[in-house]
Image (cartoon, grey):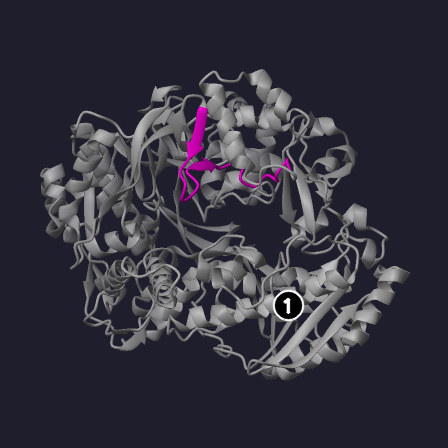
Amino acid sequence: MSKIAVRAYTQKCNARRNDTDRKDPPLRHDRVLVFDTETTTDQYQNMKIGYFEIFQDGYIQHKGLIYDSSMLDNRENKVILTYSKKQDLLLYSLEEFVDEVFYPEIFGLGTLCVGFNLAFDISRIAKHSGDSRKGKKGGFTLTLSDNPFNPAIRIRKMGESYSYEFSTTNQNKGKDYFSGYFLDAQTLAEVLLQKKRISLKRACELLDTKHKKIDDIEHGTVTKEYIDYLIMDVKATYDVYSELLDELDLYQIDIPVTKIFSAASLGKYALKQLGIQPFHKQNPLFLPDVLGNVMTAYFGGRCECMHRLQPVKVTVLDFTSMYPTVTMVLNLWKFIIAEKLRMESVTSEIKDLLSKVSLEYLQNKDNWKDFVVMVKIIPDKDIFPVRMDYKGNKSSLNVGVNYLSSKSPMWYSLPDVISSVLLTGKVPEIVEAIRFVPSGVQESLNQSSILGIDLDPRKDNLIQVFVEERQKIKTRMKNIKRDSPEYRHLSSQAQAIKILVNAMSYGIFIELNPDEKKSDIEVYGLDSFDTSENRFEKPGKYYHPLLGVMITSGSRLFLSMAEAKVKQLGAAHAYMDTDSVFVPPEQAQEVVDYFQPLNPYNLNISLLKPEKEDMWFYGICSKRYALYYKEGNNFSFYEHERSYKLHGLGHLTNPFPNGNKDWHADVWVDILSLHYGIIKPIDIEEKYSNLYAVSKLTVSTSNVLKRFKKMNEGKPWSKQIKPFNFCLVGFQTIKDDGQVIKPLAPYSKDYQKIVYDIFLDYNTGRIMQGSHYFKSLNMTILQYADHSEYKYKGKIGQLKRRHIHVDSVILIGKEANNIDDQPLEIYPAQIFLNKKEIMDKIMELTPEMGRTVGIAYRGTLNRIQERIRQTGDINLNAKFMRGLADKLM
């Protein structure tokens, strides 16, 4: 029997939703200050020198060098003094820059502050850090100036980006409060260029900027060349900022440049510009228990390795714009612009519909318009998405698609129910079916021009318009030279359309932002209850769980159809991930042809297309595989992009700093060579045994910085580990006193050296030392290569689905992303605690039953039960009681 988890919907008790929008900052800024710093290369990373330029309407108004003489030796001080005189540059001490330039500009004049990795540079010019409070918990409050009129700056991590604002002071509060304008050009580049962790050098290359980053400079020592390098970085940063504004102008969306935190930001402002109102505003009285039922059916994308540790030839088939296409096929645009949403009971109709399900039935796109339905079922060896702790070690919850049986009813979307019928050949036991019907059209809708396209949301399906326009642009690009200005312009436009259409097709509809603190909330899922033990998850502006559930489940139905079609052809798929399926090459074209009748567009767009053809596939588990060519004992990968995944190792630093930059490819060659018998495990051990698994991270939250408290205690600022410093993380191989050790060390240029120095245990803050606490790279790679696909049965070759028998269901909140790639601060989904139900279960325990859940003594059980009888309460913050609650749920 198994415990499974489903998502839930929360509301604050007796609280009204506040939809008051703050006044937006300017869309663009006439005056801009760009600055950069260079630091010591030790663990403290103190600023040595800096440079800034101030622009007004694109023209330089002021520029200057910054230095901290206490961080420079006599020779370096002479170098910067001489340089400033020869170049006729004003020279500011760090304090002078902060008080005479930074604050008069950024706080006094409202100048936009721009940097590349801005949080790091602002923290370099700070002199003190404290923890942010209230709504900014987890962030930093950085003091830059001793002048009480100059407010501190609060910086807080938001997903992959940061928010910046001035703190409140006696002079900066109320209606006069000014938060400041800050822009990290790196974040903007990541959004508009769709490149994660992009470097300044790469951004310059992609944008073909006038100024480029200087290569091959020796860091740490101030020389004339080093100052040239610093100045060029500032000029390149301004060029990147300017070019990105041109990219942003292509969108024609009225979005402040300082409000772009992700692609979703663009999607939300596009909907706002078109006058599209959020679901909750149009349906303020929509039943929360229904939203809870809908949320229990949310599972995200489908990812699975079904052919393991055995090479097999495949062709990778990718769906064209999967989420936008599903939005089109399910006709969900009507839901986005609907005035209201109503429900109707369709139980008999759905039973009849499910009796007709076949591969041929699903080829008729007219049938899909009736699929926006939630179905209450009692699963009995039906195939459904299941979220559970497959590993059984309480490390994480994963989603698999397995046989499911439960005595209690559960809610699933109709596309998932259809998938089950298609794959099992039987209709589940239907308890109830509810269709959601869009009613009317919002009166607030506006006509507007976005991405050069005139749009009327009353008449136009924006998803269709954008996808078709992008296909037209890509067709035009085929007849134009790649190095021509027209090609670059069209490429930018096509990229912009792709970013925007994807942003409007999924993520914004399922956005939830958990509070930092617990509060009194109402929890809705398969049942409902009140609790004070959990955090409220505030819905994003365009939160619409029905759309989030239907888009993802519709995508899973596409994948199930591909699975069923391959099976019909007498074969099996090897791998699936969200919008792609790996199939035997000989079946690929028939699968492609099968899907084409579902094309919802007015153009002849291939709905499913081969991306990587006739390649060897070697799979370990989800997100861990390689696609490769093999000639004799030599392996090669796809030329145009990485055709291998190292999920779980992607965060590790390169152990060969002077070797191959793409060491991941080397690891995969070794894994493949091991499989084919070209090398033996001893060869892996010899190659990697003296190297260790080490990650480079940023001290991005106050929780991480607190781990350095003992190291920082009693030391001046210059000798402290500071916010946004880099740090290094190791991976434990042993336990100490029964507790797992997680090494955390200050930054060093030599990543591998930290295993011999003192480090902190991340979990306890203790200062420790010893290389035996670190995981060797050879052990890491060998364990990686043998990682199980826990979600399915089997070890080698074609895997089979497990049969999950449900004995309990827990309600959970927002899930963490990329858990395997996060060596620190993994925040698992919160489990919503129904205290009354837990107390009722405790009161039902007998001494024998108590021993099975960890209550060893009868007297202990009696004391707990007596406390419940007397007070009607238990303390779920206590470690023992929390563990007991977990076992009882």
Left or right: where does residue 461 sit relative to residue 780? left
Q: Where is residue 85 in the image (x, y as percent from the top left)?
A: 81, 76
Q: Does the magenta stretch include residue 641?
A: yes
Residue at figure coordinates x 79%, y 73% from the top left: 84
Residue type at mark 1: give it: Val
Q: Position of residue 863 (x, y in %)?
A: 61, 32
Say above or below: 634 vs 525.
above
Q: Is residue 323 magenta?
A: no
Q: What stretch is highlighted in magenta?
A: 634-656
- What secondary structure is the stretch in magenta mostly built from? loop
Residue 221, picture quadrant: bottom right
Relative depth, front residue between 55 and 363: 55
Say above or below: 105 vs 51.
below
Left or right: where does residue 629 sit relative to residue 126? left
Residue for badge 1: 234
Relative depth, front residue between 425 and 215: 215
Q: What element carries label 1?
A: helix
Relative depth, front residue between 546 and 89: 89
Residue at figure coordinates x 75%, y 38% from the top left: 759
Say above or below: 515 vs 747.
below
Q: Can residue 134 be seen in this view?
A: yes
**Quadrant in the picture for the N terminus:** top left
**Quadrant in the picture for the C terminus:** top left
Q: Where is residue 696 in the image (x, y as percent from the top left)?
A: 64, 44
Residue 469, picture quadrant: bottom left
Q: Position of residue 510 (x, y in %)?
A: 38, 55
